[in-house]
Each structure stands twice: as C-alpha cells, then as structure tokens.
Image: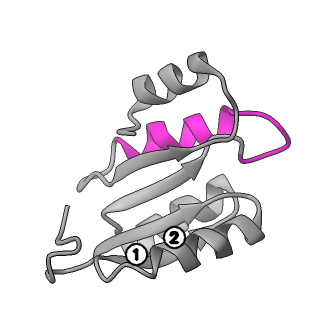
Amino acid sequence: MNGGDSGGTPIRTVLVDDHALLREGLRAVLERHDGIAVVGEAGSFDAALAEVAHTRPDVVVVDLKLTAGTDYEGMRLIGELTRWDPQPAVLVLTTFLDDDLVVRAVRAGARG
C-alpha cells in the first residue's frame, strides 16, 4: 500500500455499500485524512468490480450485506478481488455481531 499520513501518496480507497448515505458518511470521514483518497464508490457487486477495475485502488471497504440481508454478494466480491493483480487490501464493514461471518470473510481473503 501507499503513503498514509506521512505526506506520501494517499491510500487510494473504494467504498462498496448498497446504502448511498453510508457511503457519503464514510467518504466525509475518510477524506478528512490527508493520507486517504476515496477514488470511487459502488452500491452493488457488479458496480464494485467495474469501479475497482477502473480506479485500481489500494484498499476496498466492503459491506458484507450488499443486498437485502444476504452476505453472498459481499463474500463473492472479496473472493473476486483477492485474485486480482495487484491485489487491493479488502476491509469488511458490517454492523452484524456474527463471528462466523467475520471468519468467513477473512477466509475469503479480507484483511480486516
């Protein structure tokens, strides 16, 4: 990954969540840091793949529950992104207190 707050190249980040309001809030918080640049957003699996292909970010923040309460799309996206070269770091975002879900996400390739 790149720079961070040390004044180097910002960490290029894509936000993936099916709720636009949440993406907007995350963007507002993350863009307060000089070391982070939100370079794209997506609200679905297909849009996320296209956005990541276009922007080639360092980090992708993924909501595990992308569609109507199912974690299938989020897990599928993590698995897909871990096969890319270069591979972005995938961080999961969830409000669910489900240890199994977190373990499955890490096994699928999430880094945090």
Describe residue 83's horizontal placement relative to residue 32 as left or right.
left
Asked if residue 11 is positioned above or below residue 37 in the image, the reply reads above
Task: Give the residue pinned by disc 1.
Answer: 55
Residue type at mark 2? Glu
Q: Residues within 10 Å of mark 1 (few under 14, many from 20)?
A: few
Work out which residue is located at the far right of the displayed protein and give it. Answer: 68
Task: Give the residue pinned by disc 2.
Answer: 51
- Looking at the picture, how far across and down is residue 75, in whole percent? 57, 35
Q: Nearer the viewer, residue 84 or 111?
A: 111
User: Quick check: marks 1 and 2 in contact, CB under 8 Å?
Assistant: yes
Residue 55 occupies which quadrant of the picture? bottom left
- Looking at the picture, how far across and down is residue 6, in whole percent? 14, 76
Q: Residues within 10 Å of mark 2 (few under 14, many from 20)?
A: some
Asked if residue 62 is positioned above or below residue 28 in the image, the reply reads above
- Looking at the picture, how far across and down is residue 7, in whole percent? 15, 83
Describe residue 76's horizontal placement relative to residue 73 as left or right.
left
Asked if residue 107 is positioned above or below residue 61 in the image, the reply reads above
Q: Is residue 27 magenta?
A: no
Residue at image position (22%, 71%) is 4
Work out which residue is located at the far top of the displayed protein and give it. Answer: 100
Residue type at mark 1? Thr
Residue at image position (67%, 58%) is 17
Q: Is residue 68 magenta?
A: yes
Q: Tell me the magenta residue range.
A: 66-82
Q: Secondary structure at mark 2?
A: helix
